[in-house]
Amino acid sequence: MAAEASVHLRPATPEDRFLIRRWLAEPEVRARWGSAAGAEAGITLAMGTTAALPRIIECDGKPVGYAHAVEIGLWAQEWPQELAAGTWDVDLFIGSAEYRDKDVEHTALALLTAEVFATTLAVACSAAVSVRNEGAVRSYERAGFRWLRVWSDPFFGPCWLMLKERPPVR
């Protein structure tokens, strides 16, 4: 599949909530995003503020996953000190099993971070990726993220703290 040409992001709407809930019930998605209740709380926050970009990932015009970018100051948890103010947290999941390949995931990450940098004053995008999820770590790397260190996330345990800095102005 030529995912690069067919992956698009669109704003998530309240009408997408049923589909998102169905995806959150999938064991593969729960393994990445934790409990459905906790994931729904984060998605509700993202969909309810202008300091976030909640997106539906589409492939060939079909909704296949969810992504969001949120200014880290909105999250209740304490973030590592090396993340500067103005950093945005990005995360996603591919809900449709047939599209859970690295091309769709890393392409969606690249699109999301490009949108963050084009539409906000974000200094960087960050992610906490479980050390047990090597596939996701590789997707973030392919989307331009670099490893900072291992960080103990209060919900998911040991995670790679990853960062993609704002590209320089040309």
Image (spheres, rainbow, N blue to C red):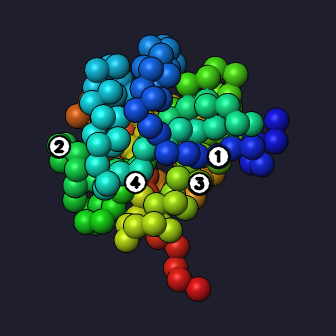
State the image coordinates of residue 154 (x, y, percent, origin top left): 23, 34
State the image coordinates of residue 9 (x, y, percent, origin top left): 58, 46
Say which of marks 4 and 3 sits in front.
Answer: 3
Say which of marks 3 and 1 sits in front.
Answer: 1
Query: Alpha carbon of mark 3 to alpha carbon of mark 1: how far?
Result: 8 Å
| Structural crowding at the residue carrying mark 4, measured as other residues with C-alpha within 10 Å and reported as few (<14), some (14–19) or many (≥20) | many
Residue type, label 3: Leu
Disc 3 vs disc 1: Cβ atoms closer than 8 Å? Answer: yes
| Structural crowding at the residue carrying mark 1, measured as other residues with C-alpha within 10 Å and reported as few (<14), some (14–19) or many (≥20) | many
State the image coordinates of residue 55 (x, y, percent, origin top left): 49, 43
Q: Is residue 20 above or below residue 148?
A: above
Query: Alpha carbon of mark 1 to alpha carbon of mark 2: how far?
Result: 30 Å
Residue type, label 4: Ser
Residue 8 circle label: 1
Q: Nearer the viewer, residue 50 or 121?
A: 50
Residue type, label 1: His
* Residue 31 makes an appearance in the image: no
* Residue holding disc 3: 111
Secondary element at tag 1: strand
Residue 103 circle label: none
Whichever of labels 2 and 4 marks the residue nearer the N terminus, that label is: 2
Q: Is residue 59 above or below residue 38?
A: below
Say which of marks 1 and 2 sits in front.
Answer: 1
* Residue 89 makes an appearance in the image: yes
* Residue holding disc 2: 76
* Residue holding disc 4: 126
| Structural crowding at the residue carrying mark 2, measured as other residues with C-alpha within 10 Å and reported as few (<14), some (14–19) or many (≥20) | few
Secondary element at tag 3: helix
